[in-house]
Image (tube, grey):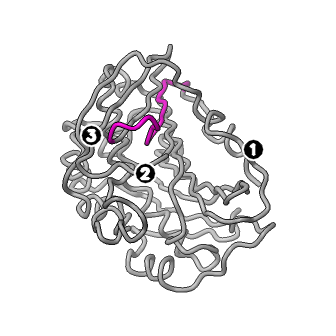
Amino acid sequence: MYEHDIIIDGIPSKAMGYLNSVILPRGGFKRHNTLPSISITRRGFKIDENHLSEFRRMCGWAASEHLPFVYPLSLAFHYHLGIFAHRDFPWSMRSLLGLRNHVLQRRRIRAGETFDLSVRTLGLRVKPKGVEFDIHTKFSSEGQAVWESIHVYYLRGSFGGNDVRPLKDYLDALAVGEFQTGWDAPRLGGLEFARLSGDLNPVHYFAPWARLLGFKRDFCHTQRIISDCLQQLPNARKVLNMEALRLDVAFKGPVYYGSKLVLRGAGRPNGVRFNLYSDVTDRPAMPGNIQEVNVDHDLLAGLARDCV
């Protein structure tokens, strides 16, 4: 059992969520602290058809009886906000960065299914220059987990950590690419997608605020760009029609609206390893890997042991 087990019957309030997690003071994080044990569950949840249609329109997914593989990512943050707003959560959301997503689909999901949706804190890793912590999201149908994700968030700071594991521990290197394709990042729709995803951070739709924080301008939500990347894979239809899939993706830099994007990658026996580059740089903005897995694949096995 979690210290705070919360049952809800709707989407957490955005107004209260942002008030508590952005404006009101938080307790902060001290060396040797642990992550508060918080879980939020919503039972008997059905996908809103209008929300799904809007996601398909903005991200270019054709109508289908099944949900797009990455569609639940556009729902997860609405519920993560409930954790960030909890009185025991130590950090203001202003100080948090998204670092990685690890996603597991055990089978393709029909749009009309009824789910139990849960989000919970997992644990943290103290790094030399900050703290990583994990939130686990799970969609269950008839008692079986059908879709899961681990969102890894990051807080900068000096907390005496010595965990120096590199990204290659989660994503192996892409030495030589077998394919390359290019397109332009979206030019519009930042505020629309903010409302869709629940992530109302102005860096995604208000250029003056983004520049104040040191960015060139406002930039795309990661969920939107992940969707683009998967659809640009040369064998996208074959891969995305697989039943059991795992996606691992890291966020290394912003993808600005209207920027020139290049996707390079190589096929693997059961999937594709890819890197997304933005505005002709040699450093990938979003390295990732998507692969077919067994239906009983354990997403938590390699990640939970890293937590303290």
Q: Quadrant of residue 165?
A: top right
The numbered mark, 2 or 1, whose residue comes first in the sequence reads 2
Identify the residue at image location x=70%, y=72%: 29
Q: Relative to 137, does residue 69 appear above or below in the rendering? A: above
Residue 116 on image: x %, y %: 47, 54
Q: Secondary structure at mark 3?
A: strand
Q: Is residue 289 magenta?
A: yes
Q: Quadrant of residue 40?
A: bottom right
Amino acid type indicated by mark 3: Lys
Residue at image point 23% right, 48% down: 258
Nearer to us: label 3 or label 1: 3
Q: Position of residue 129 (x, y in %)?
A: 68, 58
Quick one: which residue is furthest to the bottom in this view?
24
Q: Is residue 18 above or below residue 262?
A: below
Q: Is residue 188 left or right of residue 302?
A: left
In the image shown, does 105 or 209 lie closer to the viewer? Answer: 209
Distance from the alpha carbon under mark 2 to that under mark 1: 28 Å
The three-letter amino acid code for the residue at tag 1 is Arg
Whether tag 3 and tag 1 are in contact, CB under 8 A, the answer is: no
Residue named by callout 2: 115
- Residue 114 seen anywhere in this rendered image of the structure: no
Percent position of residue 13, x then y: 40, 75
What's the distance in space between the residues labelled 3 and 1, CA to CA? 38 Å
**Above/below status of 55 relative to 85:** above
Badge 3 or badge 1: first in the primary sequence: 3
Q: Nearer the viewer, residue 179 or 65?
A: 179
For discs 2 and 1, the disc positioned in front in the rendered view: 1
The residue type indicated by label 2 comes to Phe
- Can you identify the residue that label 1 sits on? 305
Q: Which residues are magenta?
A: 279-294
Disc 3 target residue: 260
